[in-house]
Amino acid sequence: MTRIDIKSLSKAALQDELGKMGEPSYRARQIFKWLYRAGVRHFDDMTDISVDLRHAIKERFHITRLVVSDTKRSALDGTTKYLFRLEDGNTIETVFLPEKDRSTICLSSQVGCKFACSFCASAPFGFMRNLKQSEILDEVLWAAEGSRHAPITNLVFMGIGEPFDNYENVLGAIRIFNDKDAFMIGARKITISTCGIIPGIEKLKKEGLQVELSVSLHAADDGIRSKLLPINKRYPIREVIRSCREYTSDTNRVVTFEYILLKGVNSSKEDAVKLADILKGMKCKVNVIYYNRIALKKYQPPSNEDAVLFINTLEGRGINVTLRKSKGEDIDAGCGQLRITKMADRDGR
């Protein structure tokens, strides 16, 4: 019999499987605590479960594991980037970002990405497959183990891949991150970032979860946005904004719009005026991000003066704006810099 990937199961599904073995429901809570609080990698380490039951569990389930292929730590701010090798040999990158009052893990949701955003380092490598729920959970388990001095408070799905293109596995992982018998991370401390997949936004608003929604906008003009994010041809700005307005109305949640500033592309005062106009009256905020340089990409960040003018123009028109500080640039861990590769060759790309 093929053994079940135990981290692919919700707590309710695990209860059902254990029920088939004649075990009471509390066993699922025990196992969840061992897997996700203690981070054990072997059933034999679950010491409050009898030897006979551990043997039976081993016969029915298996525990997936990632392998840390490489680690890079920023000398500038302590950001750590992990290269994980999956069981099938594929690789992903995950980033740990420490701050004074919190620690965040930036998660990948897919091996590669099919959406080909023109400023992103992941785009040239194409799409391989979705990450399994268990692999997403393992990203946090391994990154947290490497950072025990700074407990994890926040999770952001802003790494490689489009979370809404892997909806079920991402949401399944989120429910376990939020579970009181597992990671106990508050839903409001978890952010899903999408390039504007409207069906995903529509589904999320019906989930009853208070997770944060972030939308990569990056332009207020369809012509510009379609060059930056080809998905705009399928889900144009007016439809994305309409969906987000409905999301905020139905959930009473704030939507964050990510906006990478690109010199000569989307960072003028006129661009800011257009952006303020399309967001007028919405319960939202704009996260402004300086472009992180990527070799082989033509883009450049704007001057500080142009960036300040852009931000001041938005604020002057009543838009809530934050400037997101880029971290881990010296190890290619900044926004848009993650890719599928061996870290050792990063200087040669």
Image: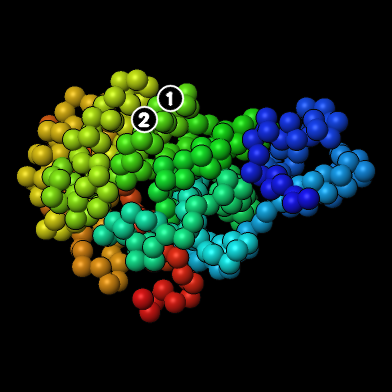
Determine the secondary structure under disc 1: loop
Residue visible at 32% across and 45% down in the picture: 195
Are there few (<14), some (14-19), or many (20+) residues within 10 Å of tag 1? few
Residue 54 lies, in percent from the top left, at 86, 45
Q: What's under tag 1, amino acid-wise?
A: Lys
For image coordinates 78% across by 27% down, the residue present is 25
Amino acid at pointer 2: Glu
User: Looking at the image, is 123 positioned above or below residue 178?
Assistant: below
Q: Position of residue 188 (x, y in %)?
A: 46, 31
Q: How many marks?
A: 2
Q: Nearer the viewer, residue 35 or 226?
A: 226
Viewed as shown, does residue 142 lie left or right of 81?
right
Q: Residue 268 — which label?
A: none
Q: Which coloring applies here?
A: rainbow
Residue 255 percent coordinates (x, y): 32, 32
- How packed mark 2 is, by other alpha carbons closer than 10 Å (few <14, some 14-19, many 20 or more), is some
What is the x, y in percent for residue 18? 79, 34
State the residue position of label 1: 206
Instruction: State which quadrant residue 125 falls in.
Output: bottom left
Examine the rendering and report whether any part of residue 259 can be seen: no
- Residue where numbered disc 2 is placed: 202
> Which residue is nearer to you in this view: 276 or 1?
1
Q: Are marks 1 and 2 in contact (CB under 8 Å)?
A: yes
Q: Residue at x 15, y 39 (%)?
A: 275
Viewed as shown, does residue 138 lie left or right of 225? right
- Residue under the image location 47 percent in, 23 percent down: 208
Q: CA distance from mark 1 to mark 2?
A: 7 Å
Question: Where, by quadrant of the figure, is residue 143 drawn?
Answer: bottom right
The vertical placement of 192 against 45, above or below, is above
Residue lying farthest to the front in this orientation:
1
Q: Secondary structure at mark 2?
A: helix
